[in-house]
C-alpha cells in the first residue's frame, strides 16, 4: 500500500487572460518510510505539488490519495481532520506562534485535536527532548536560533504521530550547518521513526539526504531517481542529474 | 484552561499597549453609561422621597389634573363620600424668591430660594395631620398674619418665636408673626410656612380657593380603600386626580432629559469603542494571517479560528466592562459627593449613595460585552476564511489599494442622495431619517474617498513639513489601508458631527430667538418673577399693583401676563392671559399664521385663543378649529384665531387668551409678569425712582430694563455654547483613543519598514514627523467628514425644529466650525504623541528582524 498516490495531477492557475499550468498530469507513488526529495528550478511546480498532497489546495484535474483515501471526496472539515492526524507540515519560515513557548508550539496539533493540556505537553516535551531542545522548552520563538525554531517546527509536525511529513524548503531560511542538521533530522524521522517524508528543496546538498529524488520541470516529472543512501556521496550524483535536465 | 482562551490571553499579553488602548475605549463607554445611570436614579430617589414625604401622613391627596386651584366647596363632595373619615382643604403653593431676598446681597446666594406657603384649616387639619410643636402654639382659625415654621427654617434665616417673616404676596409684601415652631424638617423638599387657609387665600388673592384636599379613610383594608378612592373619583369627576402632588415634576423631567442625553453620549461612546475594536481586530487578523494559515494547516478548523479571535474580543469586552463599571461607580460617588452640599442647600434634598440596580448592571454588561463581540464578529469570520496556503507564502507587506468604487461606495452614495431628497419633502420625520442615512452613507463612502482626500491633505501637510521629506510616506501609509483609515476617521466623524450639529442648532436658535426676544420684550421696563416659564411656582400680584403703576406720571402703558395651568386635548399646556389692547403696545407675539391686527381683535371675542406653534404641532390644531380646554369648571371649547408665540414660552405648549376669559373660566386675576412703557417725554430717572417705590412692596418682582433683560437672556446662549464645548470633552476621548490606536497599530505593523527607513538614513525626527503627519492627515479626513455630516445634520435639525414651530432659521455656525477644525487637528497631534515617540525610538537592528 502506498502512502501517497497521485494520478494525472494537474493544476492550472488562471490569472486574468493567461492560464499557467503549474502541474501537468503528474502521477507517482510514495511508499511507507520513504524519504523523497522534490527538486527542480523555481516555478516548476514543486510547492504546488506539496500543497496538493497536503490538501491545502485543490487540483484542477486528477487526484491525490493519502493511504488510499481520495482527498477529493473530503469536505473542508474532514480535510482539516486528516491534516491534523495524518500529515505533519514543516515550513520554510518555521511559522511558530510568537506568543507561545517552544513546548506550547510543539503541542499545538494535539491541543487543536482536543487533547488534555498536560498530556499534550508531555508528548511535546518527549519530541523536543529527542531534538536536543530539553533545555529550551519555555523559550519563545524569538529567543531561539533559526535551527532551533525549525527543530521545534519538526517536533510540532511529529507530535500527533502522523504517517506523513511534508516539508516545504525546510532549510531555505537556515545557514549551512543548521541546514545539514535539519536534513539529517528529517532522514532520522524516516529511518528511525518510520515516517514517510516528502521534502521540497532546491539545494542538491540537502536533497542528497533523501532516498529518492523527483525532478520536476515545467509541471512534469522529468526524472525519478533512487539514491544509494549514503550521506554526502550522493551529492555529485544529484548535481550531475540537475545538469543533465538542464537546470 | 481552554486552548483558544490561552492563545487569546497570550496574544493580548504580547501586545499590551494595543490591548490597553482597545480596552480603554470600552471602559470609557461603560463608565458613562454605568455612572450616569447610577447617579441620576440616586437623585430621582431623593426627589421622589421628597414628594412621597409630602403626602406621607394622609391616605389620599386630591388635586386637579392641571394642578390649578378649585373652589373650597368641592371639599363637601369629598366629605360626603362613604368611608371618608376626615378631610381637609389646603392651599399649598410654592413661593419662588429672588436670589437675594433674605440677605439682600447679590453676591451671596440665599440658602433658601423657595418656600411652600401652606394655608390650612386649623380646626380640620389635626384630624388628618399631626403637628408636634417644639415651642409656641399651633395656628388658630382666628389668627391673622400668623405663621408656624420649622426649627430648621427658623435657624437658616435667623428667626425665632415672635419675630416676623416678610413674604411677597399678590397683594404686596406681607409680614407674618411666628407663633409656633415645629421640629426641624427631616424630609427633603421646600421648607413649609403654615398659615391659616383664609390668610393664604388673601395672600394669593384666591378667595374661597384650595388646590389640595387631604383625606383619611376609615378602613385599613386595601380592597375597601381602593373602593373609597374610586367613589371619590366618581364624585369629583375626571378632571381630578388622587395621589401625591407632583411638586417637583419639572425638575424630574429635566433630570430624565439629562439621563437620556448622557445615555445617548454613553452609547455613542460605546459605538465609537465598537469602531475601534472592529478596526483593531481587522488589523490583528491581517497581521496574523500567517499564524492563522499555519494553524489551519496544522488542522485547526474554521470554527476554532473563529473562536480564537472572538474569545480575544470577549476577554477585552469583559475586562473593559468590569473596569468601566468600577470606574463608573467611582465617578458616580464622586459626582454625588460634589453635588451633595449644593443639593442640600438649594433643594433641601439629601443625596445618598449611587443607586445600582440589577437592570443597569445587566445593561452595562450587555452593552459593553455585546458591542465588543459584535465588533469582533466580522474580523473573526474573515479570519476563519484564511486558507492554510497563507502560511506558506513569504511575508511581504500587502498593499490594499481599493478599487475606485465598490458596492459600499455606491450604497453610501445612494443613501446620501436619498437623504438630500428627504429635504424636499418638508416632512419632519423623513428629514430626521435622512439625517441617519446621511451619516451611514458618509461612513460607507469614506474608504473610497480616503486616498484622494489623503492626497489633498498630504499636499497641504508637505507644505508645512516641507523639509522633512516624509509626508508623502505618511500619505501613502494611510492610502494603503483606506478602510482602516476610514473606520478611524469615522470615530472622529461621529464626535465632530455632533459638535457641529449642536453649534448649528445653538447659533440658529440664538439668532432666531433674539429676533423673537426683541419683539416680545420690547418694552422699556419688565417686572420679572424669579422663575420665568415655570409660571406656576411664582407668586404674582393682584391687579392693584399694575393699576398703581399705571397711575404713576410718565407711565404710558403697563400690560400684564396672567397664568393658568390647563389641558388642551389631554395635553398639559400653559395658558397665558393677555390684554389684547395694551399687550401690543409693549410687546408682540411672532405670528406663524394670522397677523397682529386681526388676531388681537379676534381675541376680544369670548373663548378665542392664539396657540403657540409648539401647541399647534402637538395637537394638530389649525386656525378656525375648536379645541377642548380643561378648566377648573370642566371642559370648555375655544376657537383658534391665530398661531403665534413669544420668547418666554417658546419651548412650551402655550395658549394665549384674553384677561377676560382667564378670569371667567379660570378665576385668575393674578399678574405674573408686567411690561411697562414710559411716555415719550418722560424723565427716565424720576420715573424709575417712582416705579422702584411701588415695586418695593412686591419683592417677588425684579425690575429690569427691556434691553437689560434681552442682554441677560442672550447670555443664556453663551452658557449653552460653553456647555456644548464641555460635551466636546466627552466626545474627544473616544476619538482620541481611536486615532491613537490606529497610529499605534500602524507603527507596530510597520516596525520593519521603519527599521529600514532608519537604516537607509531617516533620522528619528523624520520618523516622528512621518507619524505626526499621518495623524494630522487622518484627523483632517475625520474633521472634513465630521464637518460635512454635522453641517447637514444641523441644517436638517434646525429645519425640523422650524417645521415643528420653533422660532428658528438656519444660520451657518461659523464659530462652531472654527472650533471644530481646531479641535480635530489638536486631536490628531495629541493622538500622535505616543506612537511617534514609539516609532522614533525603535532600535534599528531589532526592528529589521521584527516578525
Image: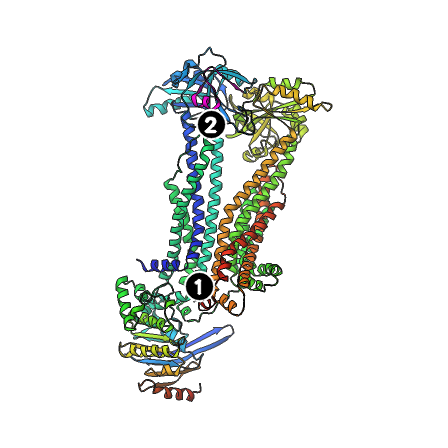
Work out whether residue B108 can be spotted: yes
> Is residue A196 shown left or right of residue B144?
left
Which image quadrant for residue B538? top right
Question: How many neighbours does mark 2 have within 10 angstroms: few (below 14), some (14-19), or many (20 or more)?
Answer: some
Q: Which residue is drawn at 61% across and 59% down?
A: B464
Question: How many neighbours does mark 1 have within 10 angstroms: few (below 14), some (14-19), or many (20 or more)?
Answer: some
Q: Marks 2/1: CA distance?
A: 61 Å
> Is residue B525 shown left or right of residue B569?
right
Extreme residue in the top direction: B142
Is residue B780 inside the magenta stretch?
no
> Is residue B806 shown left or right of residue B300?
right
Work out whether residue B556 can be spotted: no
Q: Which residue is drawn at 39% across and 25% down?
A: B56
Residue B287 circle label:
1
Does mark 1 fall on the same chain as mark 2? yes
Magenta residue span: B149-167
Q: Residue B803: image x %, image y %?
A: 59, 39
Decide: is B727 above or below B300.
above
Q: Residue B460: image x %, image y %?
A: 62, 59
Q: Is mark 1 on a helix, strand or loop?
A: helix
Q: Residue B574: image x %, image y %?
A: 55, 28
Residue B247 circle label:
2
Chain of the residue under the numbered disc 1 shown in the image: B
Decide: is B31 above or below B214.
below
Chain of the residue under the numbered disc 2 shown in the image: B
B788 or B612, which lies in front? B788
Extreme residue in the right direction: B681
Decide: is B278 above or below B350.
below
B296 or B471, which lies in front? B471
Is residue B163 inside the magenta stretch?
yes
Amino acid at each position: 500500500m502506498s502512502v501517497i498516490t497521485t494520478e494525472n495531477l494537474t493544476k492550472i492557475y488562471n490569472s486574468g487572460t493567461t492560464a499557467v499550468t503549474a502541474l501537468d498530469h503528474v502521477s507517482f507513488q510514495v511508499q511507507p518510510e520513504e524519504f523523497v526529495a522534490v527538486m527542480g528550478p523555481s516555478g516548476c511546480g514543486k510547492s504546488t505539488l506539496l500543497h496538493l498532497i497536503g490538501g491545502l489546495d485543490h487540483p484542477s484535474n486528477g487526484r491525490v490519495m493519502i493511504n488510499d483515501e481520495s482527498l477529493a471526496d473530503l469536505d473542508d472539515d474532514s480535510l482539516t481532520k486528516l491534516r491534523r492526524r495524518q500529515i505533519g507540515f514543516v515550513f520554510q519560515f518555521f511559522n511558530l506562534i510568537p506568543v507561545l513557548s517552544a513546548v506550547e508550539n510543539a503541542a499545538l496539533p494535539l491541543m487543536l485535536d482536543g487533547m488534555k493540556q498536560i498530556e499534550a505537553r508531555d508528548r511535546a516535551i518527549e519530541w523536543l527532548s529527542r531534538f536536543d531542545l530539553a533545555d529550551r522548552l519555555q523559550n519563545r520563538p524569538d529567543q531561539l536560533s533559526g535551527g532551533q525554531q525549525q527543530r521545534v517546527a519538526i517536533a510540532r509536525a511529529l507530535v500527533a504521530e502522523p504517517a506523513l511529513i511534508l516539508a516545504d524548503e525546510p532549510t531555505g531560511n537556515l545557514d549551512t550547518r543548521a541546514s545539514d542538521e535539519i536534513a539529517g533530522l528529517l532522514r532520522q524521522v524516516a529511518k528511525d521513526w518510520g515516517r514517510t517524508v516528502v521534502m521540497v528543496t532546491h539545494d542538491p546538498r540537502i536533497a542528497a539526504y533523501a532516498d529518492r529524488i523527483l525532478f520536476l520541470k515545467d509541471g512534469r516529472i522529468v526524472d525519478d531517481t533512487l539514491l544509494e543512501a549514503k550521506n554526502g556521496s550522493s551529492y555529485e550524483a544529484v548535481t550531475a542529474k540537475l545538469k543533465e535536465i538542464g537546470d | 484552561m481552554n486552548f483558544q482562551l490561552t492563545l487569546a490571553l497570550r496574544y493580548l499579553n504580547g501586545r499590551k499597549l494595543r490591548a490597553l488602548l482597545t480596552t480603554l475605549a470600552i471602559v470609557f463607554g461603560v463608565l458613562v453609561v454605568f455612572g450616569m445611570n447610577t447617579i441620576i436614579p440616586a437623585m430621582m430617589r431623593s426627589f421622589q422621597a421628597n414628594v412621597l414625604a409630602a403626602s406621607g401622613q394622609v391616605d389620599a391627596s386630591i388635586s386637579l389634573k392641571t394642578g390649578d386651584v378649585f373652589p373650597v366647596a368641592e371639599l363637601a363632595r369629598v366629605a360626603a363620600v362613604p368611608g371618608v373619615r376626615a378631610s381637609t382643604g389646603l392651599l399649598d403653593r410654592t413661593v419662588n424668591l429672588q436670589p437675594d431676598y433674605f440677605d439682600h446681597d447679590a453676591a451671596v446666594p440665599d440658602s433658601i430660594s423657595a418656600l411652600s406657603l401652606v394655608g390650612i384649616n386649623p380646626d380640620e387639619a389635626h384630624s388628618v395631620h399631626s403637628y408636634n410643636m417644639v415651642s409656641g402654639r399651633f395656628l388658630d382659625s382666628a389668627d391673622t398674619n400668623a405663621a408656624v415654621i420649622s426649627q430648621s427654617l427658623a435657624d437658616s434665616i435667623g428667626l425665632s418665636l415672635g419675630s416676623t417673616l416678610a413674604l411677597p404676596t399678590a397683594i404686596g409684601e406681607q409680614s407674618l408673626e411666628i407663633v409656633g415652631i415645629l421640629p426641624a424638617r427631616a424630609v427633603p423638599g421646600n421648607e413649609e410656612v403654615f398659615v391659616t387657609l383664609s390668610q393664604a387665600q388673601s395672600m394669593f388673592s384666591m378667595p374661597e380657593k384650595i388646590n389640595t384636599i387631604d383625606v383619611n379613610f376609615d378602613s385599613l383594608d386595601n380592597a375597601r380603600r381602593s373602593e373609597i378612592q374610586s367613589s371619590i373619583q366618581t364624585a369629583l369627576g375626571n378632571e381630578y386626580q388622587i395621589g401625591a402632588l407632583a411638586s417637583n415634576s419639572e425638575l424630574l423631567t429635566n433630570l430624565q432629559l439629562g439621563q437620556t442625553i448622557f445615555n445617548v453620549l454613553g452609547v455613542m461612546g460605546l459605538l465609537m469603542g465598537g469602531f475601534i475594536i472592529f478596526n483593531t481586530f481587522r488589523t490583528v487578523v491581517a497581521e496574523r494571517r500567517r499564524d492563522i494559515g499555519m494553524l489551519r494547516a496544522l488542522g485547526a478548523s474554521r470554527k476554532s479560528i473563529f473562536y480564537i479571535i472572538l474569545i480575544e474580543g470577549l476577554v477585552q469586552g469583559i475586562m473593559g466592562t468590569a473596569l468601566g463599571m468600577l470606574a463608573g461607580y467611582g465617578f458616580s460617588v464622586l459626582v454625588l459627593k460634589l453635588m451633595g452640599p449644593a443639593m442640600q442647600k438649594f433643594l433641601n434634598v439629601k443625596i445618598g449613595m449611587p443607586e445600582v440596580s440589577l437592570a443597569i448592571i445587566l445593561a452595562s454588561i450587555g452593552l459593553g460585552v455585546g458591542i465588543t463581540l459584535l465588533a469582533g464578529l466580522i474580523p473573526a469570520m474573515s479570519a476563519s476564511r484564511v486558507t492554510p496556503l497563507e502560511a506558506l507564502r513569504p511575508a511581504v507587506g500587502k498593499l490594499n489599494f481599493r478599487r475606485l468604487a465598490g458596492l459600499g461606495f455606491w450604497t453610501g452614495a445612494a443613501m446620501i442622495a436619498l437623504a438630500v431628497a428627504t429635504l424636499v419633502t418638508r416632512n419632519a420625520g423623513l428629514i430626521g431619517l435622512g439625517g441617519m442615512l446621511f451619516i451611514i452613507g458618509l461612513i460607507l463612502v469614506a474608504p473610497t474617498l480616503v486616498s484622494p482626500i489623503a492626497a489633498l491633505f498630504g499636499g497641504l501637510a508637505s507644505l508645512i513639513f516641507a523639509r522633512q521629506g516624509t509626508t508623502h510616506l505618511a500619505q501613502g501609509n494611510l492610502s494603503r489601508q483606506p478602510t482602516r483609515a476610514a473606520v478611524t476617521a469615522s470615530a472622529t466623524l461621529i464626535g465632530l458631527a455632533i459638535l457641529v450639529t449642536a453649534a448649528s442648532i445653538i447659533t440658529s436658535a440664538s439668532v432666531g430667538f433674539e429676533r423673537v426676544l426683541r419683539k416680545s420684550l420690547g418694552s422699556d421696563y419688565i417686572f420679572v418673577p424669579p422663575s420665568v416659564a415655570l409660571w406656576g411656582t411664582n407668586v404674582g400680584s393682584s391687579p392693584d399693583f399694575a393699576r398703581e403703576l399705571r397711575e404713576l406720571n410718565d407711565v404710558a402703558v403697563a400690560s400684564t401676563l396672567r397664568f393658568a395651568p390647563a389641558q388642551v386635548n389631554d395635553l398639559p399646556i400653559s395658558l397665558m392671559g393677555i390684554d389684547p389692547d395694551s399687550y401690543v403696545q409693549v410687546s408682540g407675539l411672532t405670528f406663524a399664521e394670522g397677523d397682529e391686527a386681526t388676531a388681537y381683535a379676534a381675541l376680544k371675542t369670548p373663548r378665542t385663543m392664539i396657540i403657540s406653534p409648539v401647541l399647534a404641532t402637538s395637537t394638530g390644531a389649525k386656525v378656525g378649529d375648536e379645541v377642548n380646554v380643561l378648566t377648573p369648571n370642566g371642559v370648555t371649547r375655544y376657537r383658534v384665531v391665530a398661531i403665534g408665540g413669544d420668547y418666554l414660552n417658546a419651548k412650551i405648549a402655550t395658549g394665549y387668551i384674553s384677561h377676560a376669559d382667564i378670569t371667567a373660566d379660570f378665576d385668575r386675576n393674578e399678574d405674573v409678569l408686567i411690561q411697562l412703557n414710559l411716555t415719550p417725554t418722560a424723565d427716565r430717572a424720576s420715573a424709575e425712582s417712582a416705579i422702584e417705590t411701588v415695586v418695593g412692596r412686591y419683592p417677588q418682582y425684579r425690575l429690569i430694563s427691556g434691553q437689560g433683560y434681552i442682554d441677560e437672556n442672550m447670555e443664556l446662549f453663551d452658557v449653552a455654547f460653553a456647555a456644548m464645548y464641555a460635551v466636546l470633552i466627552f466626545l474627544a476621548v473616544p476619538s482620541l483613543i481611536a486615532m491613537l490606536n490606529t497610529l499605534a497599530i500602524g507603527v507596530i505593523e510597520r516596525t520593519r519598514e521603519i527599521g529600514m527607513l532608519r537604516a537607509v538614513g531617516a533620522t528619528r525626527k523624520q520618523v516622528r514627523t512621518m507619524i505626526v503627519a499621518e495623524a494630522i492627515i487622518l484627523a483632517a479626513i475625520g474633521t472634513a467628514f465630521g464637518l460635512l455630516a454635522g453641517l447637514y445634520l444641523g441644517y436638517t435639525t434646525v429645519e425640523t425644529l422650524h417645521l415643528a414651530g420653533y422660532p428658528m432659521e438656519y444660520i451657518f455656525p461659523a464659530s462652531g466650525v472654527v472650533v471644530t477644525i481646531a479641535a480635530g487637528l489638536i486631536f490628531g497631534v495629541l493622538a500622535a504623541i505616543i506612537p511617534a515617540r514609539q516609532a522614533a525610538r525603535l532600535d534599528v537592528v531589532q526592528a529589521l528582524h521584527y516578525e
